[in-house]
Amino acid sequence: MGGLPRSLGRVRRMCLYSPVIIFAFVLAVLFDVGIRLLVFPKKNSTTFSRKLLQSPDGGDMNRIGTACSKDDIAIFQGQTAPLPDGIPGYTVQILNVCASGCGISNIHVSCGWFSSARLINPLVFRRIYYDDCLVNGGEALGPGESLSFQYANSFRYPLSVSSVTCR
């Protein structure tokens, strides 16, 4: 019976410490939330602003001046999660980097024997012939517009713009 009062003493100490620990935890959380509100007053609002400057001589430079070219289309690729059967996945983003006034249509991409184990909307990207893929069904991508799709294959296809029509 001598051990019973000792264990009761431990329980009493735990009961006394528990509210103090809970109070300290609540203060820490509230302090952390307060700091976040001071540092990050807005909710998640990510805005991307891209400004391209015009040439002072009014020259005919790509992505800055008035003329457009296939260089105004950028293609980015990155690896994504594989399919359940282990086939590697890739995400492709195609972007019109022209500053203004240049809708670009009939975007053709050199794509080899492009194929995918994942279904791709043919209005977004499709292979027409060997080494010729059509973007956006031939429709225009306006300045700053982009589209993306995912494909799955055992290897990454090298994709590059082969021709465009400037509007």
Image: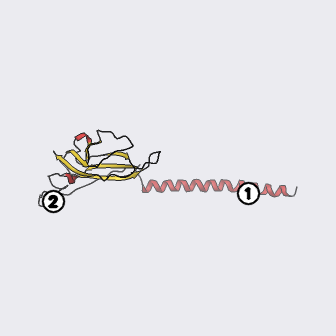
The percent position of residue 137, horizontal first and vertical second, equals: 25, 39
Percent coordinates x, y for residue 105 in the rendering: 20, 44
Quick one: SS at disc 2? loop
Instruction: Name the image quarter holding the N terminus.
Output: bottom right
In x, y percent, where is residue 129? Answer: 25, 43
Q: Left or right of 153: which side holds 68?
A: left
The kind of residue on which mark 2 rests is Ser
Q: Nearer the viewer, residue 54 or 113?
A: 113
Q: Nearer the viewer, residue 31 or 141?
A: 141
- In the image, taking residue 8 as reference, residue 27 lies left or right, namely left
Q: Which dot, 1 or 2, sits closer to the camera?
A: 2
Query: Is residue 135 toward the left or the right of residue 23 in the image?
Result: left
Residue 13 is tagged as 1
Q: Quadrant of residue 127?
A: top left
Q: Quadrant of the C terminus?
A: top left
Name the residue rendered at 37%, 46% in the picture. 151
Name the disc covering residue 55, or none.
2
Q: Which mark is residue 149?
A: none
Instruction: Answer above or below: position of 107 versus 2.
Output: above
Q: Position of residue 48 (x, y in %)?
A: 31, 52
Q: 10 Å neighbourhood of mark 2: few (<14), some, or many (≥20)? A: few
Q: Residues within 10 Å of mark 1 (few under 14, many from 20)?
A: few
Residue at (79% x, 54% y) in the render: 8
The single residue placed furthest to the right in the displayed view is 1
